Amino acid sequence: MENQPAQHAPPAVWALSLLCILPFVVASIIFCYGPQTFAHSSLAVLFAYSTAMLGYMGGVRAGIEIERHRPRLLHLAVSVVAPMIGFGLLLGQGRIPAPWRLGGFIIAIVLQWLWDVSIHEGPPWRSRMRTFVTAGAGIPLAFALEQALHL
């Protein structure tokens, strides 16, 4: 029985996941409801952190693939697509309007999630955890997008 994989995420993983979504929530609250003087910097934090999280998500996906006896080149290649989209959106400062960039991050995060949860690799609780992190990132980004559309 000891060699059986855990059916539920360990508490430390939940804690890490909560910490991972906290910057999305805080920056979005500041952008949407905070003083106008913080709007630009909180939006910049959302863009930078979204890029970092896309890199993290792609890295986790690549890490799972690298652990395989024979890593699949296509899976490794696709694992860098979302981080590169994030990088491009981050570089779009001044060229791509904020609502389009926020929408792009939401789409990239959701597409990364769809890919991750459709490939059932890793611990059995991984899909549920990825859904939690995706919602924790996507919902604050959606609030920020709605706010940016009205600026």
Image: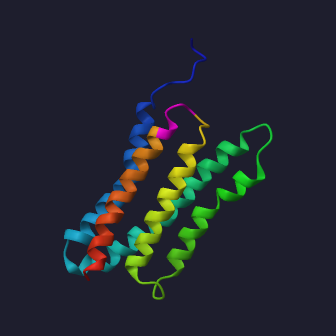
Residue drawn 48% across and 59% down? 109
Is residue 49 shown to the viewer in this render? no
Question: Quadrant of the image for the N terminus?
Answer: top right
Residue drawn 56% across and 72% down? 87
How was the colour assigned to the protein in this rendering? rainbow
Rendered location of residue 23, percent (x, y) = 36, 59
Question: Quadrant of the image for the C terminus?
Answer: bottom left
Using the image as rendered, state which of residue 137 and residue 149 is in the foreground: 149
Rendered location of residue 115, percent (x, y) = 57, 50
Residue drawn 45% across and 41% down? 129
- Main SS of residues in magenta: loop
Tell me: residue 112, above or below residue 18: below
Residue drawn 51% across and 82% down? 92
- Which contiguous range is marked in magenta? 123-127
Give yes or no for residue 40 being in the magenta stretch. Answer: no
Furthest toward the top, the residue is: 1
Specify whether 20 is left or right of 76.
Answer: left
The answer to which image quadrant residue 137 occupies is bottom left
Rendered location of residue 103, percent (x, y) = 42, 70
Tell me: residue 22, above or below residue 70: below
Specify whether 138 is left or right of 82.
Answer: left
Rendered location of residue 6, percent (x, y) = 51, 24
Is residue 101 shown to the viewer in this render? yes
